[in-house]
Image (spheres, rainbow, N blue to C red):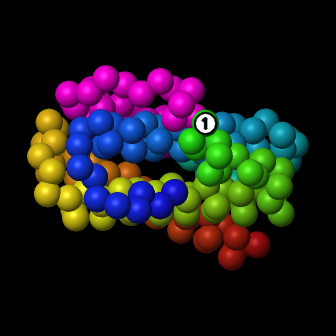
Amino acid sequence: MSVGRRITSDDQLARLLQIGIVLEEVVEARAYHHYRSLDAALDDDVEELLEHAATESAEHRERLEGLIEDLDVQSVPFDEIESLVEARYGRTQPDDFDGVLYDQLCNEETAYKFYDDLIAAIEESDAEFSVDRTELLDTLRAIRNEEAEGAKAVTEIMEGR
């Protein structure tokens, strides 16, 4: 999801962080979907990748929720944020991709791009936020880097096949 412009307020930042939470929920749900849908002969590397993706997404959600709690805002209703994410990412289902790994790679790359755009928008903004800017950017950069590592891990498994 392209953030597209500078962030000018706590409310706008909170909404974007909530979008990140929903994206993480999508990644987690899809990883669990694939894990449950595959047979018992699941490749150990793929099984570990899916378990890690689900766990990491839950951790990312908690970190994003912590940032939102530190902002001086009223939360946007969850169903409104979910509909925004659904409109952008709900066009595909987990089974629409040619294999579990392609779907997981798409999820990791989508999340990476979202965080990369969000970081750029924050860096371009001269707005004062009620959360420490350094902490905010450090958290988002760490999450973005973990998404990049996830995409790399998927690619390595794909190349090893």
Name which residue lies at 36% across and 31% down: 65
User: In front here: 2 or 110?
Assistant: 2
How packed mark 1 is, by other alpha carbons closer than 10 Å (few <14, some 14-19, many 20 or more), is some
47 left or right of 116 in image: right
Q: Position of residue 72 (x, y in %)?
A: 20, 28
Q: Is residue 5 left or right of residue 48?
A: left
The answer to whether residue 157 of the structure is visible from this angle is yes
Please determine whether, in this image, residue 35 is positioned above or below residue 7: above
Is residue 147 something one can see in this rendering? no
At 53% from the left and 68% from the top, the residue drawn is 152
Which quadrant would residue 64 be assigned to in this image? top left
Q: Which of these two is toward me, 58 or 69?
A: 69
In terms of secondary structure, what is the magenta stretch mainly? Answer: helix
Position of the C terminus, as image quadrant, is bottom right
Q: Which residue occupies the foreground of this view, 1 or 42?
A: 1
The residue range painted magenta reads 56-82
- Above or below, 12 relative to 106: above
The residue that appears at 22% across and 31% down in the rendered structure is: 71
Instruction: From the top left corner, tell me how far across and down residue 2 is, in percent.
Output: 47, 61
| Magenta stretch holds residue 132 | no
Percent x, y of residue 61: 43, 35
Residue occupying image coordinates x 84% and y 40%: 37
The amino acid sitting under disc 1 is Ser
* Secondary element at image label 1: helix
Is 140 or 6 nearer to us in this picture?
6
Residue 18 appears at what percent x and percent y?
Answer: 43, 36
* Count of marks, rendered view: 1
In the rendered image, which residue does mark 1 sit on?
A: 83
Q: Is residue 66 magenta?
A: yes
Location of residue 74 (image quadrant): top left
Q: Is residue 69 left or right of residue 82?
A: left
